[in-house]
Each structure stands twice: as C-alpha cells, then as structure tokens.
Amino acid sequence: MQRKRVIIEGIVQGVGFRPFVYQAAERIGVSGWVLNDSRGVIVEAEGEAGKLAEFLRVLREEHPPLASISRFEEEEIPPVGERGFVIRQSRALATRSAQISPDTFVCDDCLRELFDPADRRHRYPFINCTNCGPRYTIVTDIPYDRPKTTMAAFPMCPQCQTEYDDPSSRRFHAQPNACPDCGPRLTLLDARGELVPAEDPVARTAELLRQGKIVAVKGLGGYHLAVDACNDAAVAELRRRKARDEKPFALMSYGLDQVEPYARVDETESRLLQGVERPIVLLRHRVPSPISTLVAPRNRYFGVMLPYTPLHYLLLKDQFLALVMTSANLSDEPIAFEDGEARQRLSKIADYFLVHNRRIHTRTDDSIARVMAGRALLLRRSRGYVPRGVFLPGAQPSVLALGAELKSTICFTQDDRAFLSQHIGDLKNLEVFKSFERTIGHCEAILELKPSIVAHDLHPDYYSSRYAEQLSGVRKAAVQHHHAHLASCLAENGVEDEVIGVIFDGIGFGADGHIWGGEFLVGGFSGYRRVGHFQYLPMPGGDAATKEPFRMALSLLYHAYGKDLPAVPLVEAIGARDLGLYLQMIEKRINSPLTSSCGRLFDAVAALAGLRERVSYEGQAALELEMAITGEGGEHSYPFAIRREEGGWIVDPAPLIRAVVEDLQRGTTAARLSSGFHNALAEMIVDVCARVREDAGLNAVALSGGVFQNRYLTERALALLEKAGFAVYTHSLVPSNDGGLALGQAVIAGRMFPAE
Ligand code: ZN
Ligand code: ZN
Ligand code: FE
C-alpha cells in the first residue's frame, strides 16, 4: 500500500475537477479524499502501487475539458488505511485564490439535453453544467461559490439541489446550475419596455428577426444588437440607427455548414471557431454571398462566431444563415450590460429587447481573432479567454499594469503568471474610465492581489497614467510604449534574451517627447535601445491627423516635393486655399508635433490611393488599405531610403512617396499601389534588421504593435525575415495592439523592482 498527496493548481475549481477525481478513484479503486482549498485542488489517495500510479496518470492527463493545470505536485506520505473515496468540504481560504475559469460555450451534453423534448431542460436557455456555462461574467467575489455569483438570487429547486450535491452528477457543484422551475427566465419587451406576451420568447424573437426587426439580445457579457444578416433593409436600418458607425458588424451562424456559403474557412480557423472560447474569427468572404454587403463594407473579411450560449443555439437552430450580432453600443461607448442602462441607451436603436433576469456582473466583449501564417492572433482578448493566466518566463513580484488608453486592458501578475483583464475600451470616454476603475477593484478582489508596484505608460496625459499619478503607497514604473510592446511579445513567447524589436503602431509617447510609432529597438525586459526609426515628420493638427488621413498625406508630399505639390487627385480635391493653410502648418510646425509613426504612413498612402480622406474609427484607413490588395498581391515594390544618423538607422519614405505619386499619375490601381506599399515595408524591415544584426550581433526579431494586425504585412515580413535567417517571434495569445500592452508593462516593472 502507498499513499500520495497531490496538489493541483490552475483552473481546477468550478470546472468539474472534484467529481472527475472522485469518479477516477472509484473506477480505478483507490481510497482517499479530494477537496478544494485556496491554492486549488488537494487529493490524498491510497492504494496498491500500480493502481495509484494509474490514478495519478489519469489526474495529470485526462482532466475535464475546462480545467487547465499549471502545477502538479505529488509527495509520498504514510498510508492511513482508510476505505472508500470522498469529496470533503472545501477548506477556508488562506491567502491565494484559486483561479476562476473564463465563460465557456455550451458543452455537447448540455446541447443534447437542450434539444431533447424528453429532458426537463428542453429549450431552457440557461442550461449549463460543470463543463460549461457562465463564469467570469457572473462572479462577484471569491471563493467561487453560488452565493458569490449573480446566481445567488435563484435558490435551487429540490431536483437541481440533488444534482448539485451528487458527486456522480455532471452538475455536482456547478454553481450556475438551474432549470425552468428555479432559474433565470427570458422576457421579450418592446422599445418602450412593455412586455410582449409570448409563450416562447425565443421563437417570437426569431419571428421578429425574420420580419426584419432589430432586437437587442442580452447575452453573457453584455447586449448584442441582432438582425437577419441576409436582409439588406434590416442591416441598412441598423447602420442608420447606429449613426456614423462604419465598423464591420460581427456575424453569428449555427455551425460551419452555415458559414460555408459566405466565407472560406481553413483548418486553423475552423478549430478556432469551434474552440471553447468561441471568439469572433475574421474569415475571407465569398463573392457573391447571400450576406448583405452592408455588414462589412470595404472589407474582404467577415467577423464570424459560432453560438456560445444556449440562447444563441435556440435562436439560430434551423433558421438564419447568419445573424448580425454586434455589440450593443453607440460609437465609443462601452458595451451595454446593465438592464436599465441598456434599455435607455438602446431604445432608439432596438425595436425589441430579449432580456433575462440573471445579472451580468462584469461587462465582457466578444474576443476577436485572426489567423496569420497558420497561427491564431488575438486582436481582442476578452470573453472566453479572461481571466485565464498567461505564463511568464519566470516568477516576479506582483505588479498591476494599467495599459495604454485607446484599447485599454489591465494586467496583474502573481509569481510566474499574468492575468490580463477583459477589453475595457477607450478611457477618454467617462463610462469606460469608470469601468476601468471597477475592473481594477474587481480583479484585486477575485485574484486576491494588491500589488505594491504599478506600471503605466510613459505618456503623462493618458487617463491610465493620471490614475497611477494619484495612487499613493506604491512604487510606480513609467514604461515607454514601444518597449512595452516588445516586452509583451517576448513575455508571451517566453523569451528572456535580448532581441531586435520591430515595433510599428499608430502612436506612442517617445522617450524624447516626440510621437513614436515606427521603431527598431534592441532590448528585452530590463531595457532597450532605439536603433532605428522612421524619419520624423510633422503631423499637421496633432490628433486631428489621426482622424483625417489626408493631413498626413500632405505632410509626406511636402517632405518629398517641398511646396510644389505634384498633381494628384488628393491635392486637387483639397483646393488651393485650404492647401495653403495646411502647408503653412507643416512648414512652420504650427500645432504639428513630430512623429515617426508607421500607422500614419499607412494613413497617408491610403489617402493618396483615394481610399480614405477621413476615418470614423481608429485604424480604418490602414485596414482599408490592406483590404485593397487583391488576390496574392504581387511582387511590385517601392523604395525606402535608409541612412545612418546619430539616432540610428533612419528610414526615409520620400522615395516611396515619389514612386507612389508617379504610379498614381500613370493611373495605377489602388490594389497595386497597396501591395507595392506593403511589399516595400516588408523588404525595408528585413533590410534594417540585417543592418542591426551586423551591429548588435542579434539574430532574433520580435514583431509587435498594432500594425502587425495586418495579415499581408505580417506574413510577408515573417517569410522574408526567416529567409534571411532570422528567428522571428510574433504575437498569438495577446494582441499585438495596445490591448496587449499591459502584459509588457507588467514584466518590465517586475524587473525594475526585482526584490520586494
Ligand atoms: Zn454542459
Ligand atoms: Zn431547478
Ligand atoms: Fe501601441
């Protein structure tokens, strides 16, 4: 006889781990017990050596679908000779919290019951079990137990309670367990908030959607606005009511068979679509397709997700090729999640509201992913992923990192793990800022962390930096934006060494006070050197240039030609009087800060190509420039000038702009112009990296920053760099945009104050 004590850490609570241990013990024939404590799951098991070894193998290798084990420690202890195997009462919490699992899609077992007329939960929109269902969005505090969730308001009926108490049930300690007798309910309301009588609110909603109505649907982490995606008039009306919003709408389809007619899905994309996290995946659209062209104007991709709540399955079963399921918010506002607030804000957009009485505690947007070079890249890491930890290359003191401003997320670290928050949004919006503060408090509570080190962006005016400013009793680390991007990429790839960082994005505060955004760095977690960058150019009107790409185009034209601007459509469209004004701004540097931004170069080329003079959302011009590329692109390219100055390698776009202008004057297409520009960038990256390799003796390159959400550029640069013998690191687990910045800040700050 042998006895072992096992401590299992990771996401092991609320995911059916104890019943799994219990069932394995019964099956294999070992005695002992299992319990949850603050660290995770503790097991003591006793039996003959062979059986015990088999039991431990099963625990390690066959854990339940939602569990994820981060640490597995076993030690031998003296046998005590007990009989049978039991699940013991959870122990009171010590200091460290067990991790809470992300919200998860409906498992196959629950789905089968959902559509089984004989099942007591037939068509019950809140069906769940220990393997699936809401988690992060309903947790109000720890330990993760029903009273500490928004399910506390629903006492279980005797039948549900029996399942909850039965170790052999799939619903043993499933905290959100419920049924039609005791659980949350749906109601259908009209735009004025009046009850719409309906025996089956879901069936009635589907009917309304078929009629072309707009319905606000309360989901897991917030509200969606739904319309039939094949109904042009309905989609147009939704666009009209969501005024000024040109962003593509996300789609939801029942399964891959329904996606097939309108989008191409490769193997990686199909795995991603069907994964437990259920992100929105960007898929190349088919032309023609039955989907309304207004869903994603000027885009070659549809954002598509498969259903992730029982309600979605009920809505889509046997009907609709796809529904538009776009976050229910007005531009710039956070996704609506509180009932009163949602009805008020959405009353002018939605014709009907399909709501329920389970409160959403934490607002969580849908995650967005895109496959590049055969790997998934998260563009937005939120619902389904949060709060799962990201492993760091090593343990470090606990840090709270506050991120940037526009795509705000925050990050907590504990030992060798980092917890990134859900996507919070643009902190300049007051509602979003409140949500930022709430998220910090909530994460501190559920992670049981109160870090004494706070990291923030170097930009003194970001709301996140100002938040850090007013904190007392903590050590603060101001982290340069592009250094943080670099560290974020290294952290998720587990790289400790110094590398060459190619960091291209829109805007970040530079160490010299200028606006950086096209940077070549050499460095790692403990520091960096700037070894190259795009030539500084005036950004006429500062922030206004971000919204009006034509301004940056003028700045580049001026840089390449001086005052005598060439005859291109953009220049003619602006008109002599305004042109004079802008040129003065540029020449005299009036309200024109200097920038080395690569994002702004994209803007300029998009404006020259006649795609966009103004944008309605961040990154729109760059996105549309990428979308202008047809087919495989081609080999055509434009020249950059690269020269060495005191500040490192300077990349001068003047020859590129002149070549673009000549092509334009010859009447070239936007497609050729765009692929030529992308190819030029990729070639220039390799060129500069090769020079830096000579100087610094480094052979590894990290690509980070929002520009690398661009698939064409990323794949091209990756291929060329690898061909030139470089080892290349790219993002996958966290966004390359500012949504992943907090991770990098956290690791850099952890190294700044190593001994706490
Ligand atoms: Zn389930
Ligand atoms: Zn019940
Ligand atoms: Fe950035």
Image (cartoon, helix red, strand yellow):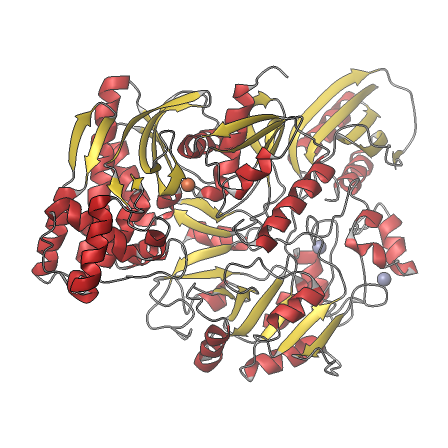
Q: Nearer the viewer, residue 367 or 272?
A: 367
The percent coordinates of residue 243 (x first, y second) are: 47, 71
Give the image quarter of residue 285: bottom left
Q: Is residue 174 left or right of residue 225?
A: right
- Tally the marks: 0
The percent coordinates of residue 37 (x first, y second) are: 81, 32
Give the image quarter of residue 195: bottom right
Q: Residue at x 80, y 29 (%)?
A: 43
Q: Nearer the viewer, residue 15 or 589?
A: 589
Q: Nearer the viewer, residue 363 or 325?
A: 363
Q: On screen, 397 above or below 247?
A: above
Q: Is residue 176 visible?
A: no
Q: On screen, 93 above or below 586?
A: above
Give the image quarter of residue 708: top left
The percent coordinates of residue 64 (x first, y second) are: 69, 42
Q: Is residue 688 visible?
A: yes
- Taking the image in four quarters, ligand 1 sits in the one at bottom right
Q: Nearer the viewer, residue 153 or 260?
A: 153
Looking at the rendered image, the quarter that the N terminus falls into is top right
Q: Is residue 709 left or right of residue 126?
A: left
Looking at the rendered image, the quarter that the C terminus falls into is top right
Q: Is residue 530 left or right of residue 10?
A: left
Q: Residue at x 78, y 66 (%)?
A: 121
The percent coordinates of residue 277 (x first, y second) are: 58, 50
Q: On screen, 726 above or below 136?
A: above
